[in-house]
Image: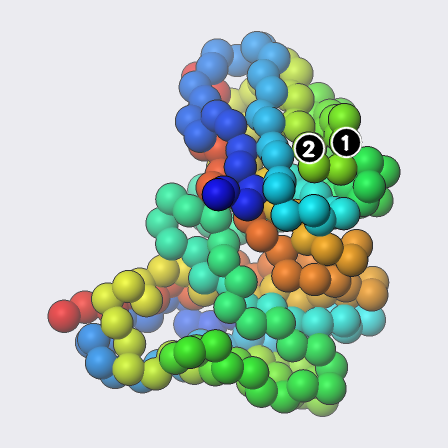
Amino acid sequence: DTAVSQTPKYLVTQMGNDKSIKCEQNLGHDTMYWYKQDSKKFLKIMFSYNNKELIINETVPNRFSPKSPDKAHLNLHINSLELGDSAVYFCASSQDRGRGEAFFGQGTRLTVV
Amino acid sequence: KNQVEQSPQSLIILEGKNCTLQCNYTVSPFSNLRWYKQDTGRGPVSLTIMTFSENTKSNGRYTATLDADTKQSSLHITASQLSDSASYICVVGYQAGTALIFGKGTTLSVSS
């Protein structure tokens, strides 16, 4: 069984569109994250939620809005997509407000054309 | 400024050889240090997590060391295999471990 699953794996869309990436974890963890990995493979945290509560919100455009309907899900909605949003987005989860080991999803490669 | 620096940026070794990857950090207050392995097209996978009081931890052929005084860590890979070819990322936790700073990774290529 996949511990952290995110869909879709690939997403190609035009500038200006709105898109969502879904993430679900079946590990019973209390903390979930969204990371962005740029073309140079550098991972940077975007958001962190603990039990559906936002605890980390790094400097990202407000076109990015995370939504956590329950502690097993953290979806990422992106409005008015721009070319610079092209990257690989990773969802992750961990226990104990991030002190435990983090498990990552397979990533979603977003390409904005 | 909280930073994690890794060296070398890339490394090529022959199968069966050992290698050591380095990580220097300036993160405060330090909580823990993690090493991750990321295969191409996959998400990172945790190898080790060390807290301030731990100075070495092993996971199979991977051994991580931590010197909290000099703020340095290393990841030693023994008897490398082709499947070790990946990016190895050093990550430092701060703010009681709730926030993470990622290094840019070392790309390791193991050839036969």
Q: Which mark is residue B93?
A: none
- Can residue A34 be seen by looking at this rendering? yes
C-alpha span from label 2 to label 1:
6 Å
Q: Quadrant of residue B25?
A: bottom right
Q: Are marks 2 and 1 in contact (CB under 8 Å)?
A: yes
- Can residue B5 be seen by looking at this rendering? no
Query: 10 Å neighbourhood of mark 1: few (<14), some, or many (≥20)?
Result: few
Place of residue A91 in the rendered image (x, y in percent of width and height, measured from the top left): 60, 40
Q: Residue at x 49, y 39 (%)?
A: A107
Give the quarter of the figure containing the C terminus of chain B. bottom left
Q: Nearer the viewer, residue A5 or B12?
A: A5
Q: Is residue A15 above or below residue A68?
A: above
Q: Residue at x 76, y 47 (%)?
A: A30
At mark 1, the secondary structure is: strand
Q: Is residue B112 left or right of residue B23?
A: left
Q: Is residue A93 left or right of residue A67?
A: left
Place of residue A85 in the rendered image (x, y in percent of width and height, measured from the top left): 56, 28
Chain under disc 2 = A
Q: Residue at x 63, y 88 (%)?
A: B55
- Residue type at mark 2: give it: His
Q: Which residue is denoted by mark 2 in the rendering?
A: A73
Q: Residue at x 42, y 78 (%)?
A: B60
Q: Nearer the viewer, residue B87 or A113?
A: B87
- Residue type at mark 1: give it: Asp
Give the quarter of the figure containing the N terminus of chain B. bottom right
Q: Quadrant of residue B11?
A: bottom left
Q: Is residue B103 above or below residue A19?
A: below
Q: Which residue is denoted by mark 1 in the rendering?
A: A70
Are dots 2 and 1 on a single chain? yes
At mark 2, the secondary structure is: strand
Place of residue A34 in the rendered image (x, y in percent of width and height, measured from the top left): 65, 40
